[in-house]
């Protein structure tokens, strides 16, 4: 049984970072100096555990109104990022559950919109959850990305 928790201790944040390092640095070749960034200090971090083994992670950062083209009338924006699932947990619905947990935290914090930069190979995953891609493709850490957004309470979040 997989449990998703909002990281409440330095050890849980470190577990999130370890999952991210495995997926982004080791598997996808993102330079280690780019994987951790200045947003990590203010983020809400999430960790998914299979028993005691961390198998997934993600984060939520609160951004200013209008962040990356979001409608400024909707207020501050929840920036969903660093969503990572270790290979052994892929295809289990864990990614969907992590997105839902992050969206629920965004709503709990009074946010009405969530934005993310998706690797282009993951666009379909986020579209199935109600996200809409916009703007041109761009490079982030050597991988092609596009911005996506979803107004909470609209569209599916399976």
Image (tube, rainbow, N blue to C red):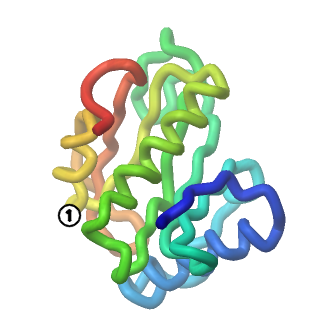
Residue at the (22%, 59%) spot, across then down: 120
Residue at the (62%, 43%) spot, across then down: 61
Task: Name the image quarter holding the C terminus.
Answer: top left
**Residue 95 falls in image quadrant:** bottom left
Instruction: Report whether residue 135 is seen.
Output: no
Residue sitting nearer the eye, 46 or 2:
2
Q: Secondary structure at mark 1?
A: helix
- Say how many tags the image has: 1
Instruction: Report whether residue 11 is seen.
Output: yes
Identify whether 31 is placed above or below 148. below
Residue sitting nearer the eye, 30 or 136:
30
**Residue 7 falls in image quadrant:** bottom right
**Relative image position of residue 49 (x, y in whole percent):** 56, 69
**Residue 128 falls in image quadrant:** top left
**Relative image position of residue 37 (x, y in whole percent):** 65, 64
Identify whether 35 is placed above or below 25. above
Going by the picture, which residue comes out furthest to the front? 1
Residue at the (57%, 32%) spot, across then down: 106
**Relative image position of residue 67 (x, y in whole percent):** 51, 32
Identify whether 10 is placed above or below 32. above
Going by the picture, which residue comes out furthest to the bottom? 26
**Residue picked out by circle 1:** 121
Q: Is residue 75 left or right of residue 96?
A: right
How dense is the environment of label 1, judged by Cα within 10 Å: few (below 14), some, or many (20 and up)? few
Going by the picture, which residue comes out furthest to the top? 73
Q: Is residue 45 left or right of residue 119?
A: right
Residue at the (82%, 68%) spot, across then down: 10
**Relative image position of residue 99 (x, y in whole percent):** 43, 47
């Amino acid at each position: 049984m997989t449990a998703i928790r909002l990281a409440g201790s330095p050890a849980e944040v470190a577990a999130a970072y370890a999952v991210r390092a495995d997926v982004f640095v080791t598997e996808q070749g993102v330079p280690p100096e780019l994987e951790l960034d200045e947003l990590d200090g203010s983020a809400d971090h999430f960790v998914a555990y299979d028993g005691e083994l961390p198998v997934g992670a993600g984060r939520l950062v609160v951004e200013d109104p209008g962040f990356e083209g979001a409608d400024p009338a909707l207020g501050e924006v929840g920036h969903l990022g660093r969503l990572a699932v270790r290979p052994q947990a892929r295809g289990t619905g864990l990614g969907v559950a992590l997105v839902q947990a992050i969206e629920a935290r965004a709503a709990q914090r009074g946010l009405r919109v969530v934005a993310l930069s998706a690797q282009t190979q993951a666009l379909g995953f986020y579209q199935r959850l109600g996200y809409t891609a916009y703007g041109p493709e761009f490079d982030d850490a050597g991988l092609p990305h596009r911005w996506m957004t979803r107004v909470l309470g609209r569209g599916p979040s399976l």
